[in-house]
Amino acid sequence: MRARPPSTTATTLKGPVMSSISRLGATALVAATLAVLPAAAASAHVRVVPEQTTAGGWTVLTFRVPNESETAATSQVTVDLPTDTPLLSVSTKPVPGWTATVETAPLPEPVDFSGTRLTEAPSRVVRTAQAGAEIADGQFQEFEVSAGPLPDAGTRLVLPAHQTYTDGTVVDWADVAEEGAEEPAHPAPELTTTEASDDGHGGADESSDEAVDQVGVADVEDAATVTASAPTTAEPDTLARLLGAAGLALGVVALVVAVLGRRRRSDA
């Protein structure tokens, strides 16, 4: 019986196949990386994440503040509160190394609250870092505020934030995005109140996680667990997406290599 001549197909295609695999792997990896870059850029804003948005209820507002300067640290964060639809009671959660001050201002019109006629309400929350507690490059910090009662359902609460750096620079996150328009360069943190659900509990703001994302001053992990004694380093959700994309690309390459290897063995 004549011996089967050695197949030259595998030898002939080896160079092009491996080259194609390399190109495929590189292309997949680059494409996957580019796919997550917009998310990384978007999450750099200061933002706010409400615990819930039910009208008439109380909520914890978590402001996430990333440091965006390579040469200076964030030493102060100020959040403006609305006075036309005031939050009549505001309290702050302590953050080690930071002081918190709630300032008040006169209301346009007096408001009845729990049997008391109020002529002023909280207007600003000022957080100031002590030496060594500033938010450095590649870090972020979260600040929590308990506030309420929330105004009528459908009310848009805009909460402009002002981020002060150790070099004297102040970044105002105060631009209000118009409906249907592109996001401004420095969008203000905001939320919209909602109706209570049938069970009497309101749901979280749909935009709150991802969200995740508008500046304000805070994306959305469990706010109660992120009051660390020091600023936390770089956005964990962005890193996870990058690693996941890279792993997916490498998995595609491995699959292609395995399929081609089986074909070569079957042709031998």
Image: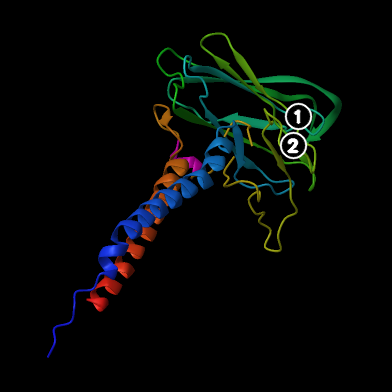
Q: For this rendering, which residue is in front, 43 or 77?
A: 43
Q: Residue at x 25, y 69 (%)?
A: 8
Residue 5: x %, y % from top left: 18, 78
Work out whether mark 1 precedes mark 2 in sequence or the reverse, and give the earlier one: 1
Residue 262: x %, y % from top left: 28, 73
Read off the residue under disc 1. 82
Check disc 1: other Cα within 10 Å, few if <14, some if 14-19, many if 20+. some
Q: Is residue 158 visible?
A: yes
Q: Residue at x 39, y 26 (%)?
A: 230
Amino acid type for the residue under numbered disc 2: Leu
Magenta run includes residue 245: no
Which circle marks residue 262 in the picture? Answer: none
Look at the numbered disc 2 and give the secondary structure of its residue.
Answer: strand
Pick out the residue farthest to the right. Answer: 109
Q: For this rendering, which residue is in front, 201 or 194?
A: 194
Residue 245: x %, y % from top left: 43, 50
Pick out the residue farthest to the front. Answer: 2
Q: For this rendering, which residue is in front, 154 or 66?
A: 66
Q: Residue at x 80, y 34 (%)?
A: 85
| In this view, 178 is above or below 247 | above
Labels 1 and 2 touching (C-beta < 8 A): yes
Amino acid type for the residue under numbered disc 1: Pro
Quarter occupied by the N terminus: bottom left
Q: Is residue 219 visible?
A: no
Read off the residue under disc 2. 157
Boundaries of the magenta span: 222-226
Prevailing secondary structure of the magenta residues: helix
Q: Residue at x 45, y 34 (%)?
A: 227
Q: Tell me the distance, in whole angstroms, between the alpha carbons under discs 1 and 2.
A: 7 Å
